[in-house]
Amino acid sequence: MTMPSAPTFAETAAEAWAPLTGWRARARSAARAARIRLAAMQQGPQTAPFVRCLYSHAVFSDTVPTFRAFLKAAKQEGEFVDTPTLRAIIADGKASDGRFFHLSFDDGFASVYEDGGPVMEEERVPYTMFVATDLIDADPETLNSYFAHMPAYRARVRTLDWPQAKAAAAGIGEIGCHTRTHARLSKISGDPVRLADEVAGARAIIERHVGQPCDSFAWPYGTATDIDDAGRAAIADAGFTSNFSAVRGAVRPGATDVMDIPRHQLEFHWPLHELMVWARGFREA
Ligand SMILES: [Zn+2]
């Protein structure tokens, strides 16, 4: 009889992210890198007002130097604000003469708290972690089924436990909701019981473990086709007061819907110049 093998996890970005395979993917990536380099040369530091939400997934020990360098560089151009401040900026529109960033992390990986947390504390950068509650203190089977749907990773990545989530929320972190199972809401909207469980159910789980109200939501996969009217209604009915997408774009105070806030994806194994290209609003509509 053999014992089930203990789960192993990627502890660095190099171990976690899958390399590109095939000449087409590599050619696309090279072309993209060239466009990014050109954009980096054309953009200057931001001096005009903006509000821009940035999100990522993990930090990892091997990307801490880039992460710290990025936060320092971004702080030269804008102030990082927490979600209640962001909501107020969007609602009143009056702060639109300022320059603001909002930073969040999806899915609930431990590296955000363990590797990124101290850096964000040091730099006084508030952050939100949108967690899929079944991935917190997860059993191996749940983790395996999550990563089976995520070809970007070549190894499983360790997720938070509830004490870490609670500790983050007691500091400068916020624990937001990203469903229970990382469900694609548009796929389950015909099942009102499942939908309520993934949205209101996940909120109740977070509040029970974290001991604070959970007001912010980000829908898994984040594009317009990953959510529909039933999903949006479930999020509003559950009492969330903001909802974030993964669609690149600027926040327009007074015009952006707080229940449909755009975000730019960044990953901290990307080079600093690329992180800054997105922080400066490359490819915004
Ligand atoms: Zn996600």
Image: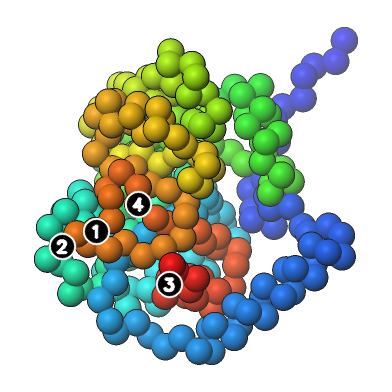
Asked whether the residues under the numbered discs 4 and 1 touch, taking CB atoms below 8 Å apart as contact, a structural biologist would say: no
**Residue in the image at 48% along x and 24% along y:** 189
Task: Give amino acid for label 4.
Answer: Ile
> Does ligand 1 reach within 8 Å of label 1's beta carbon?
no
Cα gap from disc 1 to disc 2, whole angstroms? 8 Å
Which residue corresponds to mark 3?
Answer: 281
Whether residue 125 is visible: no
The residue mark sitting in front, 3 or 1, is 1
Whether residue 94 is visible: yes
Q: Residues within 10 Å of mark 2 (few under 14, many from 20)?
A: some
Asked whether the residues under the numbered discs 1 and 2 touch, taking CB atoms below 8 Å apart as contact, a structural biologist would say: yes
Compare marks 3 and 4 and give the one earlier in the sequence.
4
Depth check: 260 or 179 in front? 260
Cα gap from disc 3 to disc 4, whole angstroms? 15 Å
Compare marks 4 and 2 and give the one earlier in the sequence.
2
Task: Give amino acid for label 2.
Answer: Gly
Which residue corresponds to mark 2?
Answer: 93
Compare marks 1 and 2 and give the one earlier in the sequence.
2
What secondary structure is marked by label 2? loop
Q: Residues within 10 Å of mark 1 (few under 14, many from 20)?
A: few
**Residue in the image at 80% along x and 16% along y:** 3
Compare marks 3 and 1 and give the one earlier in the sequence.
1
